[in-house]
Amino acid sequence: MGILHFEFMRNALLVGLLVSIACGVIGTYVVVKRIVFISGGISHTAYGGIGLGYYLGFNPMVGATIFTVASALGMGLVQQRSRQREDTVIGVMWAVGMALGIIFVKLSPGYAADLMSYLFGSILTVPVRDIGYIFMLDLLIAGIVYRYFDEFKAVAFDEEFARVSGLKTDFLNLLLLFLVALTVVVMIRAVGIILVIALLTIPPAIAGEFSHGLKGMMMLAVLLGIIFTSAGLGLSYLFDLPSGATIILVAAVGYILALLCKR
């Protein structure tokens, strides 16, 4: 409990709580709808926005938000209207986003000292302004999910039936991808771009093994996210390990134990 005397640890635990809410709610839809690969593509295009932020001198988190939202909507439109293979288009956007980020960072004046924190996460160094930004994104995500909960549930479990029933499935899919993009931005500072997919999928995947309803699955996923981030933070502090990677490893161990218990 002594770690709570440090302000940066209190801030990190707060970020972990906010991250857990976003990944528990939206990660549930990602797991049920089986769009993990799309989520990975969205997360890696964020690097282009981070590089653009450094290059033009504004908050990299804002740049990441712009790029992830644009890529999410682009992937959704391609999925709906293009004849190209969906996985091919996602792979192209994934690569282009990373390439643009590398180029923008190279062209930026000076040295981007904390750039690696966006790749692998640095929850211990999240500034207060970013905590406020993450909190606002959480509120936006919660508000939209509350408004469209039943519609999202229909699209996630049986999209064809939802379309026949008269729901605007194309709009709902784009809106869901928009929320995935916001969730990715929320998690980048906690676990980094490379590890986002794990935290977005592991807690909901465990929750899905022990839940019989969507709301229960979300609540359990949020709780598991809080446990994993808090335990990962404690272990990284005690053993001087990278925080983002430690959180993911704790979550992976939890997933293995859950499968063994279920068996």
Image: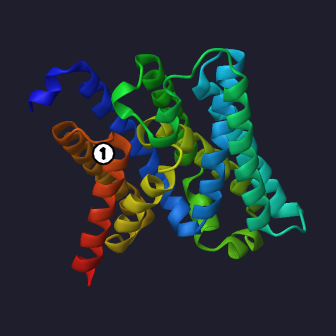
Residue at image position (22%, 77%) is 261
Q: Does residue 223 sit above or below 164 in this rendering? A: above
Residue 231, percent from left and from top: 22, 47
Relative to 29, say whether 230 is above or below: above
Q: Is residue 52 visible?
A: yes
Provide residue 49's location: percent of width, then percent of height.
68, 32
Viewport quadrant of the N terminus: top left
Which quadrant of the figure has residue 161?
Answer: bottom right
Asked if residue 96 lies left or right of residue 221, the reply is: right
Q: Is residue 148 above or below residue 57?
A: below
Residue at left 51%, top 25%? 133
User: x and y percent of residue 105 in the render?
Assistant: 66, 28
Please tell me which residue is depicted at 31% across the width and 72% down the height of the picture.
210
Q: Label 1 is placed on what type of residue? A: Thr
Q: Which is nearer the eye, 147 or 190?
A: 190
Q: Residue furthest bottom?
A: 263
* Count of residue discs: 1
**Image quadrant occupied by the C terminus:** bottom left
Q: Which residue is mark 1?
A: 229
User: What colouring style does the render use?
Assistant: rainbow
Tell me the SS state at disc 1: helix
Q: Quadrant of residue 9?
A: top left
213 lies left or right of 140: left
Vertical relation: 25 (above or below) 123: below
Residue 138 visible in rendering? no
Is residue 2 or residue 207 the one in the foreground?
Answer: 2
In this view, the residue farthest toward the left is: 2
